[in-house]
Image: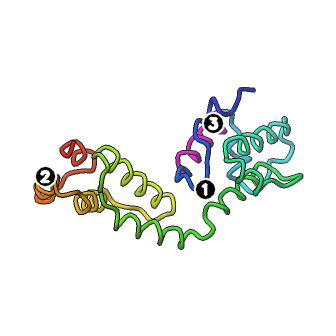
Amino acid sequence: MQNIRSLVSVVFDLNAGNYNRWRDQLLLTVGKYSLQDHVVQDASAPGYPDCTRMDYVKSWIQGTISDDLAETISARNSTARDAWRAVESQFFSNRETRALYLDAKFRNFVQDDLSITDYCREFKHMADMLGDLVEVVTDRTLVLNVIRGLKDQFKTIGMHLWHGCPFPMFLDAKADLM
């Protein structure tokens, strides 16, 4: 069996804001080996011909999360499904509180000394993290907040973007600002 990190490049950490990317990569990998039922279904498949594969999936989950999270969710005699649910539980616990703080940061974020590339990357990262917390940020809202937080030297182009018809998508606005 391959090293799971060669198949799942994202290491999930509660503070990194990479839950969806990790989840997607892990589910694609277990799907590649037809093992997704061990992760996403509560009922185990009776008489599964190679039950030892379940242990691979559990080790894959533990091998693609941060050490702190792995220690938190680790339980003796647990299944891959148990590990998966424990990771989800850790991520979604206090979801509303984390979303509230992140939304406040998102709405008050300003460019300061950041380059346009770093500024837009940070905004996109916060929008993705909010999406992970099921607080989807529309592309329009993302662009409006990018424009709002620009430093003075970019305000003129920000006003042109704001009044553009049609309203620009995030990638177009970023390209115009660059």
Magenta-highlighted residues:
20-32
Q: Residue 29, labelled with which disc?
A: 3
In the rendered structure, find residue 157 and report the number of the disc placed on it. Answer: 2
Which residue is drawn at the image coordinates 74% and 57% (left, top)? Answer: 42
The residue indicated by pointer 1 is 14
Q: Is residue 178 left or right of residue 129?
A: left
Q: Quadrant of the N terminus?
A: top right
Q: Is residue 16 above or below residue 178?
A: below
Image coords of residue 102 (percent x, y) = 46, 65
Q: CA distance from mark 3 to mark 1?
A: 21 Å
Frontmost residue, 66 versus 37:
66
Q: Is residue 22 magenta?
A: yes
User: In the rendered structure, which disc, 3 or 2, sits on the residue that comes first in sequence?
Assistant: 3
Vertical arrangement, residue 134 with respect to residue 9, above or below: below
**Label 3 amino acid?**
Thr
Q: Amino acid at mark 1?
A: Leu
Q: Residue at x 18, y 44 (%)?
A: 176
Residue 110 among magenta residues: no
Report the residue that reaches farthest toward the right: 77
Q: Residue 176 versus residue 4: which sits nearer the camera?
A: 176
Q: Nearer the viewer, residue 6 or 38?
A: 6
